[in-house]
Structure formats: C-alpha cells, structure tokens
C-alpha cells in the first residue's frame, strides 16, 4: 500500500524522507538513515530511505510523494504537487542551469553576516528571489557579535526593506535567538539561504542545541566560507517545525523574477506609468515622471538605481547565452550614469 512521505534530503542514489507510517520496515533502513532527523522525539514520525528511480530524479527537499515497498526497498510511485519552490543557478558556471533547491516552505530566512562580506545589494537580491517563491522573507543579520553598531546595520536594511522583519543574531552572545524562536512553530517550514560562511548551519545547531550539522571556518582574506554544507537537508524540530539548511549560494542570479521586481518596486512602476510616453527611456524625453521624481527627490536615486540594475539582470537572464554566465553590469552602469549626469546638469 502506498503512503505519503516528505523528502528531507537528496543523495545521488537515494532520498531520505519522513513519514508518519509506523509500519515501515525499519530494520531494512535504519543503518543508512543519517542521524540528523532523529533530533526529534515526535511520536509517529519515522525516517525512511527511498531508492531513486530515474523518472523521479528531480524530487527535491520538501517534496511530498507517495512510496511503496518493493523488493528493492521503498520506491516513489507518485509525486504530489508543490506549493512553491526555490531555484538557484547551478553552481557549475559551465552548466548555466537552474537547480531546484527546495519546495513547500512558507518562510525564507535571508541570512547575511555582519562581517566584511556584508553587502546590502546582495541582500536585496535575495529578498527579490524570495518574493518570487511567495514565501515570506525574514532578514537575518548574523554574527552580530562582530560589530558594535548593530542598530546602524538594522536601520540601513530597514531603509530599503521597510516591510520586513530584520533580526540580528549571534550564536556567541545569543542575541536574536528568542526572536527567531517565534517563527519556529508548527506548521512553519523555513528555508535558510545565504552565501557560504554566513552561519546557516551554525544557527540551526544553536536552535536545536546540538551540533548536528557540520560547520566550517571562513577564509581570513575575504571573510567568505568554504562551502562546508554540500547538500540541502530538512531538519524537524520537536514541535513539528521544519528548517531547511542549504549549501552557500554563490550568486543570487535573477531567475525569471520579472514579476517579483514589479511587485517589490511597485512605487517605481507607478511613477513610470505617469511618464508622458509609453516607451519612455527616462533619459531626456519631455514629461518623464521618473526624472521629475528623482529631481524633486520623491524617488531616491539609490532605490531607482537598484531597480534599474535588477531589471537589467532579469533581462540579461532571459537573453543570456550559454557562454555568458556572469552578468555584465557595465552597460547598466553606463545607462544609469547617463541619467544621473542629465539630472546633475540640470541642477547646475
Ligand atoms: N563570530 C561569530 N561566528 C559565527 C557565528 N555563526 C557562525 N559563525 C562562524 O562562521 C563560520 C561559518 O559557519 P557555518 O555555519 O559553517 O556557515 P554556513 O552558512 O553554514 O556555510 P556553508 O555551509 O559553507 O554554506 C564558522 O566558523 C562559525 O563558527 C556567529 O554568530 N558569530
Ligand atoms: Mg552550512
Ligand atoms: Zn520616463
């Protein structure tokens, strides 16, 4: 008889999953199951190993599917529809493909550490990507113990992301852990994303009070991590909340997120709608609402700049050929500087 499971980890030849079926053949599976999901004492939840079949190779962490016992072990017989999913660009630049990272989550913790690698533009891109999944993003500024002016960072982030919860955390001082705990309730499923070394796995270890996940040193020269976590993994807390640890994401390329940009920058979009010409380039056309808004400072130059850069990246993603994996920002910069120069000229 088929029963439903949820995938918690993906390996080359098999999946790990959880299910609330007590009759699974544990003897068959127990040795292979990684201890990671056993931090929980939840009744009726069991770990199970599922053998991969070719047709089902695209299952990801968070997916629900139905499995059946067979002479070869448990196999997937039906996959259930995803509520949402998160893609990243394939880590191999030559691949230029999207990789499905996880599915069926309702929150995304966008983690950026307060070390020298802090970059508000990258944070903003993470947020935009999160919006495209329909899950709610929460900004986590990790390693708050490394700076003395945490509130300055929080305020900077809130200035460009006014609607989001921003939590500074430290596994050293335990700052912010209580605030995070309020999200860690059933039936939430929280996806952790961020560059390598920002402390995703460390944060989970702190949450579960156990070093269940491997963590790694960061490099002195650039404060970046060494890609310690290599596979995504769902961890089940005692209360039924689920957290997904992911490998560090090198670049938050814009994957088909035009809609999210429009939504996130609805203020800019509304101004553009007021331009006299439908195809206004906002350079020097008469009746340009964008230039007017920039001049009278009802639209901040910073915000407009971010909008232009992201739109351009989204456009490049759609157009880019297999050869060109990195986004060439030069052209965007040129266009933007031209607009800026025009405005400055007029000011003089
Ligand atoms: N000072 C300080 N260091 C931290 C904190 N959290 C994590 N670290 C350190 O940062 C380094 C990287 O932590 P990880 O948890 O491995 O980072 P990660 O985001 O999981 O990295 P990847 O698995 O490579 O993507 C480790 O040396 C941690 O001890 C913190 O709150 N404060
Ligand atoms: Mg990690
Ligand atoms: Zn215009």
Image (cartoon, rainbow, N blue to C red):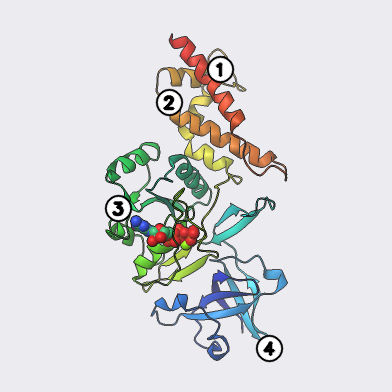
Q: Which mark is nearer the camera, 1 or 4?
A: 4
Q: Earlier in the sequence, mark 1 or mark 4?
A: 4
Q: Is residue 89 above or below residue 274?
A: below
Query: In the rendered image, which residue does mark 4 sit on?
Result: 71
Q: Earlier in the sequence, mark 3 or mark 4?
A: 4
Q: CA distance from mark 2 to mark 4?
A: 65 Å
Q: Is residue 306 above or below residue 47?
A: above
Q: Earlier in the sequence, mark 2 or mark 4?
A: 4
Quadrant of image for the N terminus: bottom right
Q: CA distance from mark 3 to mark 4?
A: 53 Å
Asked if the beta carbon under badge 3 is closer than 8 A to the nearest atom of ligand 1, the reply is yes
**Extreme-front residue of the structure:** 221
Looking at the rendered structure, the secondary structure element under dot 4 is: loop
Q: Residues within 10 Å of mark 1 (few under 14, many from 20)?
A: few
x, y percentage for residue 54? 72, 71
Q: Earlier in the sequence, mark 2 or mark 3?
A: 3
Query: In the rendered image, which residue does mark 1 sit on?
Result: 276
């Amino acid at each position: 008889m088929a029963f439903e499971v949820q995938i918690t980890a993906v390996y080359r030849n098999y999946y790990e999953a959880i299910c609330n079926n007590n009759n699974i053949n544990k003897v068959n599976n127990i040795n292979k199951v990684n201890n990671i999901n056993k931090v929980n004492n939840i009744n009726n939840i069991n770990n199970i190993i599922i053998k991969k079949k070719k047709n089902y190779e695209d299952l990801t962490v968070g997916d629900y599917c139905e499995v059946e016992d067979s002479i070869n072990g448990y196999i997937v017989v039906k996959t259930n529809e995803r509520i949402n999913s998160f893609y990243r660009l394939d880590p191999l630049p030559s691949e230029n493909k999207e990789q499905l990272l996880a599915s069926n989550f309702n929150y995304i913790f966008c983690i950026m550490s307060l070390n020298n690698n802090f970059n508000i533009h990258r944070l903003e891109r993470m947020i935009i990507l999160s919006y495209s999944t329909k899950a709610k993003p929460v900004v986590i500024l990790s390693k708050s113990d490394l700076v003395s002016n945490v509130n300055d960072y929080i305020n900077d982030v809130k200035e460009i992301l006014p609607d989001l919860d921003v939590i500074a955390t430290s596994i050293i001082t335990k700052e912010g852990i209580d605030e995070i705990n309020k999200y860690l309730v059933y039936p939430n499923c929280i996806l952790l994303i961020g560059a390598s070394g920002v402390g995703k796995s460390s944060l989970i270890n702190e949450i579960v009070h156990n070093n269940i996940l491997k963590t790694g040193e960061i490099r002195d020269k650039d404060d970046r991590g060494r890609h310690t976590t290599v596979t995504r993994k769902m961890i089940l807390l005692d209360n039924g909340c689920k957290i997904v640890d992911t490998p560090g994401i090198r670049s938050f390329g814009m994957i088909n997120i035009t809609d999210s940009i429009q939504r996130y920058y609805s203020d800019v979009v509304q101004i553009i709608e007021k331009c006299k010409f439908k195809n206004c380039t906002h350079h020097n056309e008469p009746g340009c609402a964008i230039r007017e808004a920039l001049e009278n400072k009802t639209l901040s130059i910073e915000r407009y700049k971010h909008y232009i850069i992201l739109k351009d990246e989204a456009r490049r993603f759609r157009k880019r050929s297999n050869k060109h994996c990195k986004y060439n920002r030069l052209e965007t910069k040129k266009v933007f500087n031209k607009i800026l120069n025009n405005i400055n000229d007029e000011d003089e």
